[in-house]
Amino acid sequence: MTKPLTSLALVAALATSLVALRSTDVLTDTGVTMANIEEAALTNLKADGSFYVEPTALMRRMARRIPTDAQAATVRALGQVVRTYVESDAFRQAYRQSLSGQYAVNETYSDSNIAQREAEVGMVDEAVDAQSAALRQTMSAVDPVMFYTMMKAQVPQFEAQAAAATGAERTQLTQEVADLKRMLAANAGKPAEFKKQYVAYQEGRFRKGGKQYEANANQELADAKIHNAEYRKQKAALAAASDVRPPLRKQLQAFVALCDEVDFGAKLYASGSKQYFVNPAYERKPGAWKLLFRLGKTPTMAARQFAGEWLTALPTLR
């Protein structure tokens, strides 16, 4: 499987991917895409001092034709593209998103959601009052005789609905049917009084339902506030981890150190179609070290200089 390119080793590795430097379009000249850079920066900024480098076949083909005197300038031009992206808001957002799986930041318990829940609890009485007012307004236009007759005719239907229900719903509907029949019987021949009592009965149900909702909502709010404390803790941890400067500084320092370790005068010997280091210790070096050796001193030192300058400017990165 092809390994991802590192955003730092990328600067050096891709120096060998040029035919000629055109500062107006270094990506076209190198065969590098922003997708390459985006993947490399994100993956390798989290690599903790390690570098994964694998130039594409296109980059390797172009490397064979690169003019020696264009290498250093090309490294700097490409390095600037990488740096501009890594210091952008787009990269910071992508980096933060990539870390989100490591932190249990559940937005269900965010400060804004807690505030919304508190507001909803505080508006229960207002909502009940509005519901009652709407009922009274609607019923004011209803003829008492017609309403009494209609409700009495619907009792069998209400009883059938209650019988078909189960559990708590059945209990509630059965009680409501019983209350309705009681009001109808107590107000036979008095439709206006029946309508008045029916409206009062429904308003009572609204108030009871509002109180029950408020009690449940307060309990849920109390539980949510407990989770909110953990939310704040995890959000703070994510915010701290989302600062790209510490891992970027570590990667830049590691890259500079790696460049300094490469022995560009190391001797090779051929064995079959491959070449090996005469010094067996060099054969055990990581792939990034060997890649820099193959690139040569000029592009590697140009990349090292660029990384050093970036390190110097890093404290100013917000």
Image (spheres, rainbow, N blue to C red):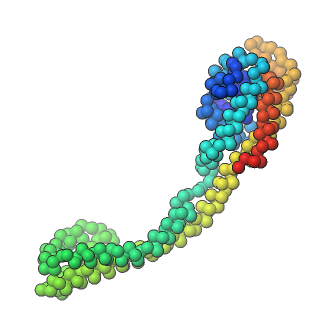
Residue at (76% x, 45% y) in the render: 314
Image position of 296 (left or right of 236): right
Q: Position of residue 212 (x, y in %)?
A: 40, 76
Residue at (35% x, 74% y) in the render: 130
- Specify the quadrant that holds the N terminus: top right
Placement of 148 over or under 25, stated as above or below: below
Q: Quadrant of residue 47?
A: top right
Residue at (54% x, 63% y) in the render: 112
Placement of 174 over or under 232, stated as above or below: below
Identify which residue, 229 or 124, lies in the foreground. 124
Q: Position of residue 183 (x, y in %)?
A: 21, 83
Q: Quadrant of residue 73?
A: top right
Residue that sits furthest to the top in the current view: 272
Placement of 296 over or under 243, stated as above or below: above
Q: Position of residue 96 (x, y in %)?
A: 63, 48
Residue at (20% x, 71% y) in the render: 158
Placement of 11 over or under 89, stated as above or below: above
Identify which residue, 36 or 3, lies in the foreground. 36
Q: Position of residue 142 (x, y in %)?
A: 18, 76
From this viewpoint, is residue 279 visible? yes
Q: Quadrant of residue 270?
A: top right
